[in-house]
Every structure is written in C-alpha cells, then in structure tokens.
Image: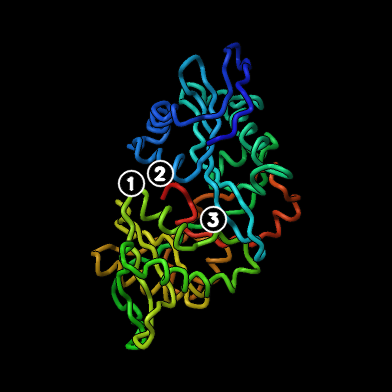
Amino acid sequence: MTYDAGAQMLEIAGTVFTLRDVGPSDCTAVLGLHRRVFGSTVDAAWFDWKYRHGGGEAVGLWQGHELVAHCGGTPRTVLHHGRPARDLQIGDVMVAPEWRGVLRRRGPFYHVSERLYSSRLGPAKDFFAAFGFPNERHLRLAVKMGLSWDSGPVEALSWSGTGALPRPGWSWRAETLAVDHPEFDRRVTHAWSAMQQEAGRYSMGVRDAAYLRWRFAMRPDQAYRFVQLRRPWQRLPCGVVVLGPTVAAPNYLQWLDWVGPLALLPMACTLARLEAARSGSAGLTTWASPAVARRLAETGVTQRSVAAVLGVPKASDMTEEQVQHLDWWLMAGDTDFL
C-alpha cells in the first residue's frame, strides 16, 4: 500500500468526491464499508492480513470523511505458460448501498476501478495483469464500461452423499499436515515442485509454502486444514489438499485447493470426499475453472453451477486475443474470500 499519485477531486451526480489511494490509516473506514456491503464481520486483524502482510493495494472514493466506494487487490505470482508474472488479484470491490444506483459510465464503481487498474497494471507498471471473480452482473457492467474482459465462467462443483465412496487402497495414506510441523515447508515445496512441472500450459497461481502460509494459515477469520497424500514407503507427500469449513447450507465441506501432480487430482477429490464423510458433512464442494473441471469430469460430480465469472482488466499487459487463449487453473482457494 505504498502507491500514491495524489488525491483527485471529481463530481458525480452533483456531489463532490475525493478519489485517492487507501492506506493503513483507513482501516476503520474500509471495515465499515465491507460490513455494510457484504454483511461481513471482518476486523482489524483481517485488514492487516490482507493489506499489510499481504501487500494489498486499494483505491477509495470519499464523500467528505465517508468511504463510499472501494476497489482493492493483493499481489499474486502467476505462471502464465510457465513464465512467472506479478499479477494483482482484484477483491473488495464495493459501493455503498445509497450509491449503487449510480451505474452511469462515470459512477463510483468506474472511478475506483479505473484508477486502480490504470495506476498499477500494464507496461512499466507494478503488475503485469490482474484477475478477479465478480458475479455476472458486475462483470457485464465492467465490460460495458470498457474496464475488463470476460474470461469465462468458474463453476461450483459438488459431490453429494457419503456412501459407497471409492477407497484409495493400502498404497495411499492421508494424514493431517500441521502448519507448525518442522517439515511443513519442505513437504509443500515437494508437492509444488511436482505440480509446477505441469504448469506450462496453464495460467496457474504459485502454490509454494510461503503462499499457503499466508493464504490459509495466517488468515485470522477462517480455519483451514492441510491433509497430505503420500505413499506408505515415501516420507514426502505426493500432494497436499486444503480443506475449509463446512458450508452452512447444504452442509458441504469446502475443498479449497490441491498442490501436487495434476494427474492425482481425482485421487485428491476422493480423499476430500472421505474427509467430508468423516466430518459428518453431507458432501463436498469446490470451485473449478474449465481446466480443473476437465480433470474432475469422471469423479461423479452430482451438481454443477456457475459460481462466478473471471474478469481480466483491459489495462493488463495482454491483448484481448491473448486473454481469451489463457487456460486458467483455478480452484476455490484462488479466491480471496472463501
């Protein structure tokens, strides 16, 4: 949160606003708007996790001392066809309820988004590209305003029921991996190294030990579990499954991520379903981009729906044709809010 191009005064619908970067001293205002817009219970610890420890950056629109619109993002290293790039994951896009009706081209939503994108993304800027997970309505608005490209749907996949599940057999072991285990970093690194070897055809966020620690272990308002999948004769795991809390309705366990060989994703799904059964959940759920969904096609998915759409801001250092040919590898943990 170090970028600052100075405050800008502008008028929208006859009201004067100040457009400027959001800083650490704006924590209370950001939390207040977040609670109003999303009905959340986030607090200062969450703000620190995301915008201090996570290096998040944001732009806000102010009416006097009141924050009425906000667009933020957190840095994420992404491998685009095997080449690492510093991307910005867009999140916390919010407009105060009384200003949501101002959907004109130059409304609050446009101004906070445009300033964040134009100041951070593209050639000679801090970030190569950006991506986010808006709902369909918000992405249509961003596309209409010329802010973003539609990069396709991300599905919610679910597996209901816990009976007659396939069993991994004697040659596999599923064990909890505590984040304070002395070999946590080594084991995640081993799993990520195997996964990274297959990342060349995808746009895939880095899933190394540092990222898993920040994204899942350090987050103060959620509780996640790591489960390692290994062979009995091997000390290091083949991969690591990340599980979240049970979704209140319909009581499904959240499968956030998999770190390991892509060929073992169906096996990871079996492991996650068994963990759901052990926890008393009615089933398992995750998010999947088309690349992930193809790998899970034969796992007995019982329900699928569009969870979100993937938006890529036009200020990114890519052409529309390049964006449309990206094959994203995305699961629920690639969001910033699940």
The amino acid marked with disc number 3 is: Val
In this rendering, which labeled residue sits more in front, label 3 or label 1? Answer: 1
In this rendering, which labeled residue sits more in front, label 2 or label 3? Answer: 2
Residue nearest the observer in this picture, 112 or 206? 206
Q: Residues within 10 Å of mark 3 (few under 14, many from 20)?
A: many
Residue 126 location (% of width, % of height): 64, 43
Residue nearest the observer in this picture, 20 or 114? 20
Marking on residue 220: 1
Residue 76 location (% of width, % of height): 55, 52
Tell me whether circle 2 and circle 1 mark residues in contact (CB < 8 Å). Answer: yes
Marking on residue 49: 2
Residue at 45% across, 62% down: 209
Q: CA distance from mark 2 to mark 3?
A: 26 Å
- The relative height of residue 338 versus residue 92 in the rendered view (above or below) is below
Residue lying farthest front? 182
Q: In the picture provided, is 165 more to the left or to the right than 328? A: left
Residue at 43% across, 47% down: 337
The amino acid marked with disc number 2 is: Trp
Residue 86 location (% of width, % of height): 61, 51
Dot 2 lies on which element?
Answer: helix
Identify residue for label 3.
Answer: 154
> Which mark is first along the chain, 1 or 3?
3
Q: Residues within 10 Å of mark 1 (few under 14, many from 20)?
A: some
Residue nearest the observer in this picture, 316 or 217? 217
Q: CA distance from mark 3 to mark 1?
A: 26 Å
Marking on residue 205: none
- The relative height of residue 162 versus residue 216 in the rendered view (above or below) is below
Colour theme: rainbow
Q: CA distance from mark 2 to mark 1?
A: 7 Å
Residue at 58% across, 61% down: 204
